[in-house]
Amino acid sequence: SYTNPYYTDEGISRGFDVYQRDVDSTRTTISQYQSSTLGGGVRFGVPITDDETIHYGLAAEQTKLTLTSTSSQSFVDYVNIFGVSTTNLMGTIGWTHDSRDSVIYTTAGMMQHAFVEIGLPASDLRYYKLNYQQQWFHPLSKDLTLMLNGEGGAGKGYSGKPLPFFKNYYAGGPGSVRGFAPGSIGPRDSYNNALGGQKRVVGNAELLFPFPGMAKEKSVRMSAFMDAGAIRGEGDMAGTTGLRYSAGLAFTWV
């Protein structure tokens, strides 16, 4: 990836990405498959105000899938219909509002991010994903900060095509609901592996405070947290799509 943050004098940024992404879910608790994606794209960031930016981009990618004997039947059905190799012309557009006083050691402010990803009609994949996140930081005292975070996402296919299973949402693990294996929340297949889903919701409440004895050190921090999250989708087993919760202590080192 390459980004020029001042592509124009007005502060418009331009970036390029070239990537190969290999996924092997057979080493995880996610329903079993392998994929190899080769792609590239261009993206721009246009500042509206000091705190707001519009992002948009265009990328092309090709994905090759490999299933195993323990792959979900829904994955097998998808490959039987659409094949093991697909191309995607992907458009993205997003909006960010960021008024946090610090990205690394935040004590006050808000961050909002809305993002849309679309598989354009010229490609094999035709889908859209809508995502929104909001974080709010409020200082309770000199050393205590309350952080509330909420995230939601929904995806669906169009023109008679489904949301590709390798574009599903997942939750669980660091960054969503701590205390659970990565991607393990939500519907499961007949082998008890997580399928992901078309809808995702995550909420976090966190009380942030300095590491004991290191109040002036801004690269380390502790917190007490409560997390919750859910994934909705079509699974082979019932009773696995409710909210999951966790609570605990966290240590962050930047």
Image (cartoon, rainbow, N blue to C red):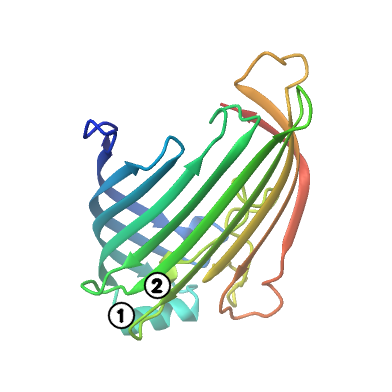
Locate the N terminus by quadrant: top left
Frontmost residue, 27 versus 233: 233
Q: Quadrant of residue 164?
A: bottom left
Crowding around mark 1 (Cα neighbors within 10 Å: few <14, some 14 to 19, many 20+) is few
Q: Residue at x 28, y 50 (%)?
A: 20
Asked if residue 188 lies left or right of residue 165, the reply is right
Q: Amino acid at mark 1?
A: Phe
Q: Residue at x 76, y 29 (%)?
A: 144
Image: 169 above or below 240 = above
Image: 246 above or below 9 = below
Image: 139 above or below 95 = above
Mark 1 element type: helix
Frontmost residue, 214 versus 67: 214
Rendering coords of residue 187 (x, y %): 61, 72
Locate the C terminus by quadrant: top right
Crowding around mark 2 (Cα neighbors within 10 Å: few <14, some 14 to 19, many 20+) is some
The residue wearing badge 2 is 164
**Mark 2 or 1, closer to the camera:** 2
Mark 2 element type: loop
Q: Give me the C-alpha separation between circle 2 and circle 1.
A: 10 Å
Image: 13 above or below 153 = above
Rendering coords of residue 13 (x, y %): 28, 38
Which residue, as the protein is rendered here, is positioned at the far front? 49
Rendering coords of residue 69 (x, y %): 45, 74
Rendering coords of residue 65 (x, y %): 33, 67
Query: What is the tally of numbered marks visible in this picture?
Result: 2
Callout 2–callout 1 Cβ contact below 8 Å: yes
Q: Amino acid at mark 2?
A: Pro
The residue wearing badge 1 is 82
